Amino acid sequence: MTEASALPPDDFDAAATETFDSPHDTYRELRERCPVAHSSAYGGFWALTRFDDVERAARDSETYISSVRAVVPSDPRGIRRPPLNFDAPAHSPFRRALDRTLHRSRLERLEPRLRLHAEREFGRFLADDGGDICVGFGTLYPAYTAAEWLNLDPADVPRLAETSSMWVDAWRRQDGALVTAKSEAMYDMARALVADRTARPRSIDEDPASSLLAEEYEGAPLDQELVVGALRQSLVVGLVAPPILLGGICVHLARHPELHRELRDDPSLIPAALEEFVRLYTPYRGFARTVSEPVTLHGRTIEPGEPVTLVYASANRDERVFDEPDDFVLGRPNIARHLGFGRGRHRCIGMALARISLRIALEQIVTRTRRLEIDGPIESTRMPEVGAQSVPLRVHL
């Protein structure tokens, strides 16, 4: 924080114990009385809670920059990895290289393989008579999705799933030693990937590591350690949100069995349902920026160096934009406006792949079960995510 800043008293306690529903009550109140809110938790940060403010900040990458703080709480070691922690133009070649491997024809080829992974892993979940959807199917299946995109050895997937899960939990708890240990394990995977593709390059349209190694910035190849960092980020970024989102979906379906029946009876409704689930249970509230110059918003001034979070989970329930924002509305007329995948230069790189993967997961859940039942306490996640990180389920077939 800048010494010149006269920070206000806390408007909310970002480190308070939460339930599955309570954060949305907090953000509803903040949207009304304090849309630019401050908390001293995690070293202090601001929170933008209204849709228009969050969307405007996400689009304005000149004012709201990512190179100082891109998430709250941040990596306790201060590591900066592209493209998330870089600003344009340095950010652009990493983004371009990764985008190149997510074209429509490749995603169409990946879809049947993702379905096989989903069928197998959800079949194992059913064979065990249910369990924790977030820890089992919700973690392993997204890891296979990431492996298909990155062309990893399928034998490495269980290790990747376990390592990334332990890493993100340590990050939430700000356990620097465990964060370092698990991060280094993922760096080892990324370095092995770079070494293999350096020796045996693949098509740059089909392989992220090869694409990054072929990319240039200011007339020179990308620094190899930054390529490793980008792949290290890619190894985990697609494994953080899906378990939380799938957990939220299953809680909702357990609470609303009539919706489960409707989707089971008419699977053509699943894509629309998924978009509404993403709006309702967006798992991000801690993606952050700092400002390049003082910004005054709703009568409060944010100074450079002070982290400001874009609370997508709050923006997606803003009553100024979405009618009945806390309700599930199938076929919501303006559902395309939701911010579940972000906006601007730092919107989710893999959002097209994520939509396919999540749709397949939802198909498995609603078509292979008759009813879901919560079978124990729901464990809430912590900043920078919001939602459930543990949802024990009993399944009725």
Image (cartoon, rainbow, N blue to C red):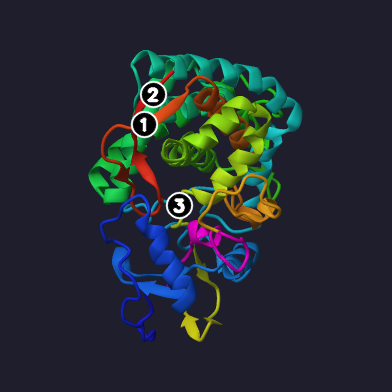
Magenta segment includes 307: yes
Between tags 2 and 3, which lies in front? 2
Where residue 10 sits: x, y (%)? 32, 76
Which quarter of the image is occupied by the N terminus? bottom left
Q: Between residues 162 and 382, which one lies in front from this camera angle?
A: 382
The residue that mark 1 highlights is: 373
Q: Judging from the image, what secondary structure is the residue with disc 3 in? A: loop
In the picture, the disc for residue 395 is 2
Q: Is mark 1 on a helix, strand or loop?
A: strand
- Badge 3 crowding class, 10 Å Cα cut-off, few under 14, some 14 to 19, many 20 or more, is some
Mark 1 → mark 3, Cα distance in angstroms? 42 Å
Q: Which of marks 1 and 3 is nearer the N terminus?
A: 3
- Judge left or right: residue 357 versus residue 109: left
Determine the CA span between mark 2 and mark 3.
42 Å
Q: Where is residue 188 in the image (x, y as percent from the top left)?
A: 40, 30
Q: Mark 3 points at which residue?
A: 80
* Picture residue at 58% right of the left edge, 21% below the top: 114
316 relative to 275, above or below: below
Image marks 1 and 2: residues in contact by CB distance under 8 Å: yes
Q: Is residue 271 above or below residue 321?
A: above
Residue 263 percent across, percent down from the top left: 59, 31
Residue 166 visible? The answer is yes
- Look at the picture and state if 263 lies above or below 156: below
**Residue 184 visible within the image:** no
Question: What is the quadrant of residue 216 in the picture?
Answer: top right
Toward the viewer: 252 or 214? 252
Mark 3: which amino acid? Arg
Q: Is the residue marked by circle 1 packed among few (<14), some (14-19), or many (20+) residues within 10 Å? A: some
Where does the magenta region start and end?
305-324
Residue at 31% over, 81% down: 9
